[in-house]
Image (spheres, grey):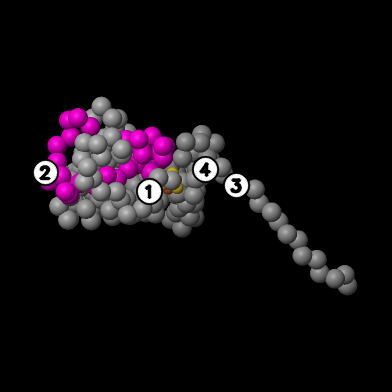
Amino acid sequence: MTAATTKRVLLAKPRGYCAGVDRAVLAVEKALEKYGAPIYVRKEIVHNKHVVSTLESKGAIFVQETDEVPEGSVVIFSAHGVSPVVHEQAKERNLRAIDATCPLVTKVHAEARRFAANDYDILLIGHEGHEEVEGTLGEAPHRTQLVDNTDDIASLQVRDESRVVWLSQTTLSVDETLETVDKLKARFPLLQSPPSDDIC
Ligand code: SF4
């Protein structure tokens, strides 16, 4: 009998995209295994045609909005996160929702809720219409103003300049965001920063 040999298998980074998206893709694969096809996925889970078509061939169906999902089906929310309204819509349609929101995005949502509950105005630096921004805005829609570019700063109105905080979309450039923060601070000197940097 030959001595046992141990083989070490080294895996290259399998997919080449961020950890949050990787986690969401895995959630779709696991849901397909557990519940069987079809599994509905709200929004494109990853900008990679090969991965999307592979998931489709296994039974994933990509939709833009929750109302495209048949009542009672399984739906996965993508890594960029959704607003509370989307969770409500899923409940109303009796969907089994699997939330694959990236933990870093979940953290920004929690910050938005906490600052809004403490009566802050929130200046959210991010791109209008971006899925992640829509989700974060939805956490505190009456307390949050979007800063898409520095031209927006002049028209911002806050209720109390000592209770203003900035938050950001996680996928922005750090340098550009900090430039925007400097310009916001020039307008609102007491502007507070989030407890930690949320840029990915
Ligand atoms: S925050 Fe966004 S970019 Fe960063 S890991 Fe999560 S999903 Fe990916």
Q: Residue at x 47, y 36 (%)?
A: 47
Between the residue at mark 4 and the residue at mark 1, the CA separation in whole angstroms equals 18 Å
Q: Amino acid at mark 4?
A: Tyr
Amino acid tagged 2? Arg
Residue lying at the far bottom in this picture: please name it. Answer: 1
Left or right for 86, reference 60:
left
* Mark 4, residue position: 17
Q: Which mark, residue 159? A: 2
**Closer to the N terminus: mark 3 or mark 1?**
3
What is the CA distance from the residue labelled 3 to the residue labelled 1? 25 Å
Closer to the eye: label 2 or 4: 2
Instruction: Check if mark 4's residue and mark 1's residue have beta carbons within 8 Å.
Output: no
- At a point 32% along the width and 43% down the height, the residue shown is 168
Which residue in the protein does label 1 denote? Answer: 198
Image position, residue 91 (x, y; %):
24, 53
Classify mark 2: helix, strand or loop.
loop
Residue picked out by circle 3: 14
Q: Residues within 10 Å of mark 4 (few under 14, many from 20)?
A: few
Quarter-wise, where is residue 144 in the image?
top left
Instruction: Find out whether residue 166 is within the magenta segment.
Output: yes
Q: Nearer the viewer, mark 1 or mark 2?
A: 2
Q: CA distance from mark 2 to mark 3?
A: 48 Å
- Residue 71 image position (x, y, % from top left): 28, 48
